[in-house]
Image (spheres, helix red, strand yellow):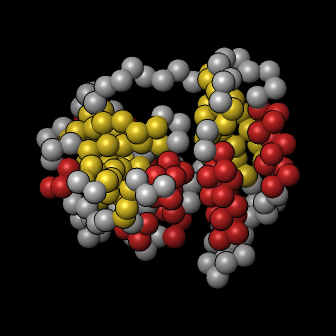
């Protein structure tokens, strides 16, 4: 366990990973998902077993309903892992239309770096933006310093002459698996961003859909 330790009320949430499985390629970025789950478990006082993780992944794709599956894992504090699997059909390629969330993220909140079942902040902000403007596909969040953080379901990337730029974790955002992979391969680097940096377009992405283009709606 890290110095961060278990948080108060840790029994009322789980740690989640959503992983893409394909019949031809198996699980995509599976080691990244395992590393994040292990690191979050250690930081927040959850039990975690590599063996249990591998067993659950094997079970989830024994009788696949489709060639592509969205596999969702939930780790409870006692180390038990639940799972669900459903067919995943990618959306046709398009430029996603993005609004700015009305909610600000607190960069000092340690939970923002971990993917937990406490998703109300993200889902409520996205639902509110879509109710106000049906064109909205995603929202991006700012922190208390007006720095860009992330989307409700995506990490954010800005094309730069030397590669992709992505906000650093200390802005208050999830340690996305796709984001970590791009950083590890040298295709992205951390850099603080503001809304004005995004006016000419940017990219979003996650470990289910990969990267895709996006633009602000204002």
> Looking at the rendering, which quadrant does residue 133 occupy?
top left
Give the answer, above or below, for where 69 lies relative to 205: above
Residue 37: percent from left, percent from top: 67, 56
Foreground: 11 or 80?
80
Foreground: 89 or 160?
160
Q: Is residue 193 left or right of residue 156?
A: left
Quadrant containing the N terminus is: bottom right
Q: Is residue 62 left or right of residue 190?
A: right
Is residue 103 visible to us here? no
Is residue 205 visible to us here? yes
> Looking at the rendering, which quadrant does residue 167 occupy?
bottom left
The residue at the point 43 percent across, 22 percent down is 91
The residue at the point 65 percent across, 30 percent down is 25
Give the answer, above or below, for where 4 lies relative to 160: below
Give the answer, above or below, for where 143 lies relative to 154: below
Foreground: 102 or 86?
86
The residue at the point 49 percent across, 62 percent down is 112
Quadrant containing the C terminus is: top left
Residue 87: percent from left, percent from top: 62, 21
Residue 12: percent from left, percent from top: 67, 57
Q: Is residue 58 left or right of residue 161?
A: right
Q: Name the outermost residue toward the top.
A: 66
Give the answer, above or below, for where 131 lies relative to 151: above
Q: Is residue 49 left or right of residue 209?
A: right
The residue at the point 25 percent across, 61 percent down is 193
């Amino acid at each position: 366990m890290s110095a961060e330790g278990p948080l108060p009320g840790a029994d009322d949430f789980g740690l989640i990973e959503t992983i893409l499985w394909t019949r031809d390629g198996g699980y995509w970025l599976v080691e990244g998902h395992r590393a994040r789950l292990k690191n979050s478990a250690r930081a927040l006082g959850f039990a975690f077993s590599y063996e249990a993780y591998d067993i659950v992944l094997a079970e989830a794709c024994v009788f696949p309903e489709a060639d592509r599956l969205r596999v969702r894992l939930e780790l409870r504090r006692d180390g038990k892992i639940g799972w669900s699997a459903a067919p995943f059909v990618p959306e046709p390629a398009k430029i996603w239309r993005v609004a700015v969330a009305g909610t600000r993220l607190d960069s000092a909140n340690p939970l923002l770096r971990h993917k937990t079942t406490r998703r109300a902040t993200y889902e409520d902000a996205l639902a509110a933006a879509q109710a106000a403007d049906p064109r909205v596909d995603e929202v991006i969040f700012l922190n208390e310093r007006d720095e860009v953080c992330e989307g409700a379901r995506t990490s954010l990337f800005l094309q730069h002459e030397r590669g992709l730029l992505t906000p650093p974790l200390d802005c208050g955002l999830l340690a996305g698996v796709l984001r970590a992979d791009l950083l590890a391969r040298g295709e992205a680097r951390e850099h603080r961003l503001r809304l004005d940096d995004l006016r000419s377009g940017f990219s979003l992405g996650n470990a289910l859909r990969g990267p895709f283009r996006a633009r602000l709606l204002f």
